[in-house]
Image: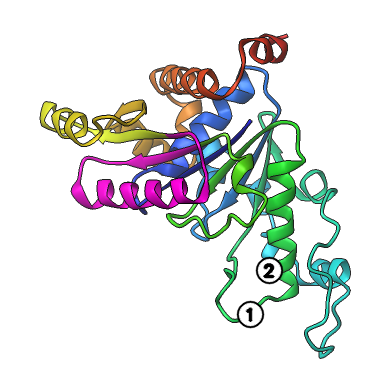
Amino acid sequence: MKIAVTGKGGVGKSTVAGMLARALSEDGWKVLAIDADPDANLASAIGVPAERFAELVPISAMKELAMERTGATPGGGSFFILNPKVDDIPDRFAVEHEGIKLLAMGTIEHAGAGCVCPEHALVRTLMHHVLTRRHEAVLLDMEAGLEHFGRGTVEAVDLLVIVIEPGMRSVSTGAQIERLATELGIKRIGYVANKISSAEDEAFIAEQMTGRDVLLIAPFDREIQLADQAGMSCYDRSETFRARARNFAREVTRRVVSQEEIIHVSR
């Protein structure tokens, strides 16, 4: 099961990705969580303690590893391996918490930026590997664009989750992401409507999301802010939040996983 979570900055997508990771892990899934947003917040949403988070080095910052794996040499020109060995990286460099393995990609130089460096080759190959070769639930917390997806990886995404809040700018960004994702060939797209605080908000979402698959409508939750101020995950603080996360995880798995696979995982 491969799930990517995206949305306009500030809508709460890291919170959504973190709650899904915790709920799936609690339900028996092996979870690999990938923070692919340069503004990395997934660790705190999952609840990784500060001392463990300090051990997490973004893959894009591992310059020596990138040089070693690609065969690049300082001042050696532009010739290096574009598909380096990466299969050991998730288990070797991930930080583990509550049964979840967490990796941070760091700042990625996107194709077309005028530079394909060893670090870029390492990150892009790793993204392809986790989406096509890993046999667990892989969750990607992404920035609003879909530039992380290269050829051969888009079809591996079982579900793209677009997080929105009740505002036209957020909804418009979500619609742009949906159009691009459809053009790329992502077949399943679902929405999370976050920070709903009134009947007017609910009516706005109902109108804007007509014909779209809404996986979760989440209220504005003061507990999330309080948990953040306390330096912890809301999943560890609020039973209401945990119940919401479990319902969300059920909606996700119901759309992308067969009943036989769900029974197998639960065992």
Question: Residue 194 is drawn in which quadrant?
Answer: top left
Where are the magenta residues, as a range? 160-189
Query: Is residue 261 within the magenta segment?
Result: no
Q: Position of residue 252 (x, y in %)?
A: 50, 24
Q: Which of 16 and 179 is in front in this view?
A: 179
Q: Is residue 173 magenta?
A: yes
Residue closest to the far left: 200
Type of colouring:
rainbow
Residue under circle 2?
120
Q: Are marks 1 and 2 in contact (CB under 8 Å)?
A: yes
Against 56, residue 15 (above or below) is above
Secondary element type, mark 2: helix
Residue 49 quadrant: top right
Q: In front here: 165 or 154? A: 154
Q: How crowded is mark 2: few (under 14 residues within 10 Å), some or many (20 or more)?
A: many
The answer to whether residue 45 is left or right of residue 238 is right
Type of the residue with mark 1: Cys
Taking the spot 76% from the left edge, 72% from the top edge, the residue there is 63
Q: In this rendering, does residue 155 appear at all? A: yes
What residue sits right under mark 1 in the picture? Answer: 115
Where is residue 117, by image quadrant? Answer: bottom right
